[in-house]
Structures are given as structure tokens and as C-alpha cells.
Image (cartoon, helix red, strand yellow):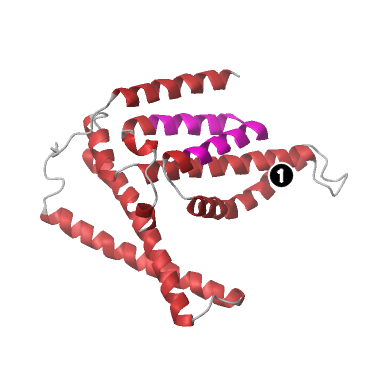
Amino acid sequence: MEMRKESRGFLHRLDPLSKLVALACLATLAMHWDDLLRQGALLLALIAAAKLGAGMSWRRLLRRIAWILGFGLPLFAVTALAVQLREGAGGETLLVSSTALTAGAAVTLRMVSLFLSSLAYIESTDPKDFVVMMTTRLKLPYRFVFGISMALTFLPLLAEEGRQAAAARKLRMGRRPRGIAERLATRRGQLVTVFAGAIRRVEQTAGAMDVKGFGAYRERTFLRDVPLEAIGVWTMIVSLGLTAGLWLL
């Protein structure tokens, strides 16, 4: 799989709880800031964290950013139009004001930042460690935590199946898709493959859970423990302190 070929960064050495607190702090700042400059600085910091901390390759990182920008462009247009109409300048000129463009760009960068921070968390977190930490430290119901861990586990697997389906279709065709019709057919085939793979994995997981008696007891024991080390505690303290300081700026 592609994610296993990439190097491990310092985020892999942090426990899931400390990274979750840092992720919540980043999301708080992203939702609080409205200006373009701060959103751009936050996005650059997240790109560095995803590259150096999560060990993502530039190709994978840029492809994910380009993918989310496809959803961000309509949001940019709607936000810019809404700000333009709110300013009351919609009937005076056909040009969109710089304020409207800046507001639309800030909202778009916010979306990219939220997506990228979540992606870096998924890339650098072992789902098994996540279940242990959330259940033993936060005392969350293990049924609820197990559902989240399944999402963390399935997303990379389904993404890999989609890439394999695209590569297989390309080999059968002997060339890249041409035209809108062929591209849509290729995407439709990938979606069908991923959906079928998701259904198959859900059925297999449900059968395994039923055989092992998952949910039969209120408490669950674990073979290993994920310690909350000093570096994780300091990560949470620094994240909360920086968030409080930057909030007041």
C-alpha cells in the first residue's frame, strides 16, 4: 500500500490522545480565524506537519489538497457572492470586490486546513492504539470507539482499492481515458469497486465480531496498553497554551 511506503515522522511517536487534543486546537483556530493571512499561515503549518510529522510524500499530499480544492471552489464562489451581495455592491458593478474574494479564499483555506489536519491524524495513528487510548484514558464506550477505529482502518484500504481499480482499468484500456464520457465511466467503475469492497469488508467484520462475541460484556480488556508519556502531556499543554494565546491575538 502507498501509505506503508512513506517514511514515519515524529507524529507517529505521539499517542492518539495528545494528537487528538492538538487536532481539536487546530480546528478551533481554523474556525475562529476569518482573515486570509492567518488561514494561509495555518495551512502552511499543517502542510509542514503532514510532510515532516506524518511522513506523507509530496505527491500524495498535493493530490489530497487538489482533491479537496475541487469541493472548495464551489464554496469559494458561493461565499464570495454572498459577501458581495451583503455589501450591497452587486448591482453597481460586475466585478467582485477584493473583500468578497478574500472572504471566499479564507473559507476555502479553512476547509483545506480542516481536511488536511484530519488526514495527518489518520495517517499517523494506529487504529488499535486509538481504541485502547480512548477506552482506557477517556473511558469512552468501547463499542463507540470501535466504530471510529473501523473508519480509520477502512478509509486507507478503500482508497488503495480505488487506486488498484484505476490501474487495472488503465491496463485493460491500454491508454488513459479520453473525453468526458470515458472519464466519467472510469470514475463510475472506481466508485462501484470501492462500494463493493466496502460492503464485503463490512460483512466480514460483522461476522468476525459476532463469532468473537463483541459487545457481550460491558467492559473490555486489552492485550496491550498505550502509555501517556511525558511528550504527549507536553504536546497537549503546548497546544492548549498556543491556542489560548493565538485566540487572543
Where on the picture, by quarter, is residue 8?
Answer: top left
Q: Residues within 10 Å of mark 1 (few under 14, many from 20)?
A: many
Q: Nearer the viewer, residue 51 or 242?
A: 51
Range of magenta residues: 20-49
Secondary structure beneath dot 1 equals: helix
Pick the quarter of the image with the N terminus: bottom left
Say if the magenta span includes residue 36: yes
**Residue nearest the observer in this picture, 67 or 97:** 67
Q: Which residue is mark 1?
A: 80
Q: Please, is residue 5 above or below residue 179 in the view?
A: above
| Residue 188 appears in view | yes
Give the residue displayed 50% in from the left and 30% down from the top: 28
Q: Quadrant of the C terminus?
A: top right
Q: Position of residue 228 (x, y in %)?
A: 27, 27
Q: Position of residue 142 (x, y in %)?
A: 22, 39
In percent of width and height, residue 198 lies at 33, 62
Task: Determine which quarter of the picture holds residue 218.
Answer: top left
Can you give x and y, in whole percent of width and height, for residue 13 in the image?
Answer: 32, 35
Could you tell me which residue is drawn at 57 percent across and 18 percent down?
A: 248
